[in-house]
Image (cartoon, rainbow, N blue to C red):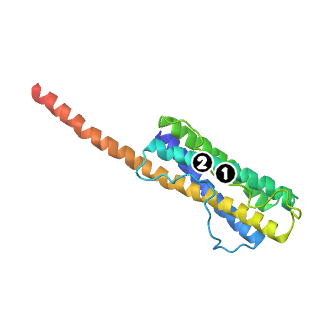
Amino acid sequence: MAGTRTRAAAVAALLQEECSNLLALYREKEDFPVDVAEVRLVPVAPPSSQLDTRDKLLHLHSALLQCHTLLERAITKEDEMLGGGEKGKYEKQREMVKNRLSHLIISTGELLKAADGSPILIPHSDDPEEPFSPSHSQPRSPTVLFKLKLWIYQIYKEVDHWTKAVIATLKELPAETDRKRKRIMPATRSARITRSMRR
């Protein structure tokens, strides 16, 4: 599991950097302020310290899957409503983030299997829809376009949020493994001492 965890951590670190670059490009492209309020679009509870390793990974894996679904919808909707012309730096960065997110989903899925868990989507009651009607009579009106752009930005922030959650959680996992080893080692030493005394 240690090798898989190392790979997952490396992928998450790259994704965090790529997300940061994507957010910067998007803010520059759409002239968005840095302090836009964050809204949680993925209704999965964060992996708290009370959860065991399997459940922490299950929450992270499920959140990443939902982030990927939202990201695909955002890309499709952005190209439909804002026009998908020649691909520039922003579009290439957007595709890079989507592909890296796919790799992180695979890595966390492998970790989940190693922890005796099944990669499944945690069900939730609220499916976050686009904050505008697709049948709007004026799909390119300023209000609709602003809502679309804000929704896309919030999705990028959501990917960034859950990527950071993966990094933080993976850092905790080795400590949990070390604690388990420390609990096992004294008992093993005691058994060896008892055996040597009997000889």
In this view, the residue farthest toward the left is 198
Q: Would you name the residue on which mark 2 appears?
A: 124
15 or 132: nearer the viewer? 132
Q: Is residue 185 above or below residue 81?
A: above
Which amino acid type is shown beneath numbered disc 2? His
Residue 62: mark: none
Residue 194, how many percent across, how many down? 14, 31
Lateral position of residue 76 relative to residue 199, left or right: right
Residue 22, how many percent across, how many down? 70, 62
Lateral position of residue 54 relative to residue 72, left or right: left
Number of callouts: 2
For the residues bearing labels 1 and 2, Cβ distance under 8 angstroms:
yes
Q: Quadrant of residue 193?
A: top left
Q: Residues within 10 Å of mark 1 (few under 14, many from 20)?
A: few
Residue 3, how many percent across, how many down? 50, 41
| Secondary structure under the numbered disc 1 in the rendered image | loop
